[in-house]
């Protein structure tokens, strides 16, 4: 029964593939995102760029806000909990959230332990910056992975680094001899069965999206060409000049990520992109949270 | 035989893999020019119906897809694909392609916690695995529609002339029964 629930949760992620999941902070934004073609929304009180600006401790959103967003749209609604905060996750499960993001964007509640996601019925997505992190999160019960990137910056560099690293490490695992996998599992600190899956299939056993710094249609297509199966856009949309327009353009770019002509069309006249901060200019590196 | 799979968003790759197992020539439809190719059948996969509908419009594919189905192209819609084809989606403000005389209900089993799997009979076939992910069901069917499967009295698969729909996802199982059924439908359609 438990295994069956996990399969269903991985399968919901399969339905999100080729899509864009957008951060929204109220019901009105959620409707804009849905109308623009988002395949799901992430409900949160403040988008990552504003979390950076405000500082302090950031936590799970108010359940009232989440309920308002659930009532406003028919697409799946996701929400974030702090790393290790299993009670926030229990609360979101009680709200029948469609996906929980155990996220480094919020202030971590535990500096050692992640949530034992196998104990929950609702699915979890987790961030990873390398193959070891990805497989550890999957062993804890995550049914979807995303790159960490560097959220709230509008700077795509870290998402690129993490996606290239994960893909490259998977290619290397695929090339190993079978008897070398045991030592590799030890090095990566991951369960052998998950590593054997990667060795055999050359991919993660769950869907893998890009996240953290995606701000333009070109950024989104870049991540897709690097092997992402879909894209999270956080601050990039509602911190830009014309959110609805930009959101639609990114949706189209993800569908036709290999067609430069389409990408040129959708990139035209989008208004101002989010201002962005270079990743060297930021104080808090969210990607270092939760390893 | 060539089958096009709408590849705007969602689980299209899973359908293509199943068609390949059945030695059918399958291709992705991402743009209007892909839709203009010759094909014997079309699959509308699972995913988000609002996303696919938006892209069908934005990429100028909507009229052509509707026209092809109205002119008899065999089409198979799973989950979101069912919603796209339904004449009416009761609890949703927009209706989509509207070529099939069924009334559907979106997210009819609730949110992700309501997703489930079971087995059932499909037409005359027994023990077919059904996977429901935030699935719709069919509330009512029109005159020429044949009900092919029910779960606890709710209609989850139906057929009308050249159109086949399932609220569940055969492409998420290893069972090729429903895809074979669609291919037989195409063969009949071509005769």
Image (cartoon, coloured by chain):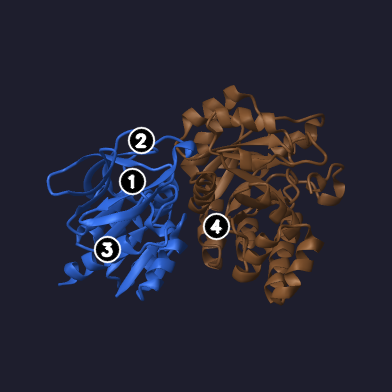
Chain colours: A brown, B blue
| Residue A257 position within the rendered picture, expressed as x and y whole percent measured from the top left | 55, 63
Q: Nearer the viewer, residue B54 or A83?
A: A83
Q: Is label 1 in a helix, a strand or a loop? A: helix
Circles 2 and 1, Cβ within 8 Å, touching? The answer is yes
Tell me the mark number nearer the camera, choosing from 3 and 4. 3
Where, by quadrant of the figure, is residue A131 drawn?
Answer: bottom right
Mark 2 = which residue?
B92
- For residue B69, above or below residue A175: above
Mark 4 = which residue?
A254
> Which quadrant: the N terminus of chain B?
bottom left
Q: Is label 4 in a helix, a strand or a loop? A: helix
| Residue B101 position within the rendered picture, expressed as x and y whole percent measured from the top left | 20, 46
Mark 1 = which residue?
B83
Q: Is label 2 in a helix, a strand or a loop? A: loop
| Residue A122 position within the rendered picture, expressed as x and y whole percent measured from the top left | 56, 38
Q: Are marks 3 and 4 on the same chain?
A: no
Which residue appears at 47% of the width and 34% of the height? Answer: A73
Mark 3 = which residue?
B182
For residue A246, side relative to residue B6 (left or right): right
Q: CA distance from mark 3 to mark 2?
A: 28 Å
Judging from the image, mark 2 belongs to the subunit labelled: B
Judging from the image, mark 4 belongs to the subunit labelled: A
Q: CA distance from mark 3 to mark 4?
A: 29 Å
Q: Are marks 2 and 1 on the same chain?
A: yes
Judging from the image, mark 1 belongs to the subunit labelled: B
The residue lying furthest to the left in this view is B143
């Amino acid at each position: 029964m438990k295994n069956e629930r996990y399969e269903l949760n991985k399968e919901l992620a399969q339905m999100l593939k080729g899509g864009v999941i957008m951060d929204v902070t109220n019901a009105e934004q959620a409707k804009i995102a849905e109308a623009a073609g988002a395949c799901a929304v992430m409900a949160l009180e403040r988008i990552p760029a504003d979390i950076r600006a405000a500082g302090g401790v950031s936590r799970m959103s108010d359940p009232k806000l989440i309920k308002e967003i659930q009532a406003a749209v028919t697409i799946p609604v996701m929400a974030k909990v702090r790393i290790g905060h299993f009670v926030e996750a229990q609360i979101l499960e009680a709200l029948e959230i469609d996906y929980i993001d155990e996220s480094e964007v919020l202030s971590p509640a535990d500096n050692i332990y992640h949530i034992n996601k196998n104990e929950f019925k609702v699915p979890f997505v987790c961030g990873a910056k390398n193959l070891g992190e990805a497989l550890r999160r999957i062993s804890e019960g995550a049914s979807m992975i995303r790159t960490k990137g560097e959220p709230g910056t509008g700077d795509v560099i870290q998402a690129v680094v993490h996606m290239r690293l994960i893909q490259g490490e998977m290619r290397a695992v695929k090339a190993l001899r079978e008897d070398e996998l045991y030592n590799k599992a030890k090095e990566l600190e991951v369960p052998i069965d998950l590593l054997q899956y990667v060795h055999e299939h050359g991919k993660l056993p769950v869907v893998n999206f890009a996240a953290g710094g995606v701000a333009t249609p070109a950024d989104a297509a870049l991540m897709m060409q690097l092997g992402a199966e879909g894209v999270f856009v956080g601050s990039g949309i509602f911190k830009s000049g014309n959110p609805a327009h930009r959101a639609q353009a990114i949706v189209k770019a993800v569908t036709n990520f290999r067609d430069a002509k389409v990408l040129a069309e959708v990139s035209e006249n989008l208004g101002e992109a989010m201002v962005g901060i270079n990743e060297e200019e930021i104080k808090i590196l969210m990607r270092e949270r939760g390893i | 035989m060539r089958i096009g799979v709408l590849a705007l968003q969602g689980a299209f790759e899973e359908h293509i893999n199943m068609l390949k197992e059945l030695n059918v020539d399958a291709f992705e439809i991402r743009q209007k020019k892909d839709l203009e190719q010759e094909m014997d059948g079309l699959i509308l996969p699972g995913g988000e119906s609002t996303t696919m509908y938006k892209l069908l419009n934005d990429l100028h594919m909507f009229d052509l897809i509707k026209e092809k189905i109205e002119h008899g192209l065999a089409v198979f819609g799973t989950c979101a694909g069912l919603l796209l084809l339904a004449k009416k989606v009761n609890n949703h403000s927009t209706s989509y392609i509207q070529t099939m005389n069924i009334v559907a209900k979106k997210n009819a089993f609730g949110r992700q916690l309501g997703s489930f799997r079971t087995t059932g009979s499909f037409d005359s076939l027994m023990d077919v695995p059904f996977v429901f992910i935030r699935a719709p069901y069919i509330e009512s069917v029109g005159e020429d529609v044949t009900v092919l499967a029910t779960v606890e009295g709710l209609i989850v698969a139906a057929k009308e002339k050249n159109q086949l729909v399932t609220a569940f996802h055969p492409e998420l199982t290893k069972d090729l029964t429903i895809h074979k059924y669609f291919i037989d439908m195409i063969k009949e359609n071509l005769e």
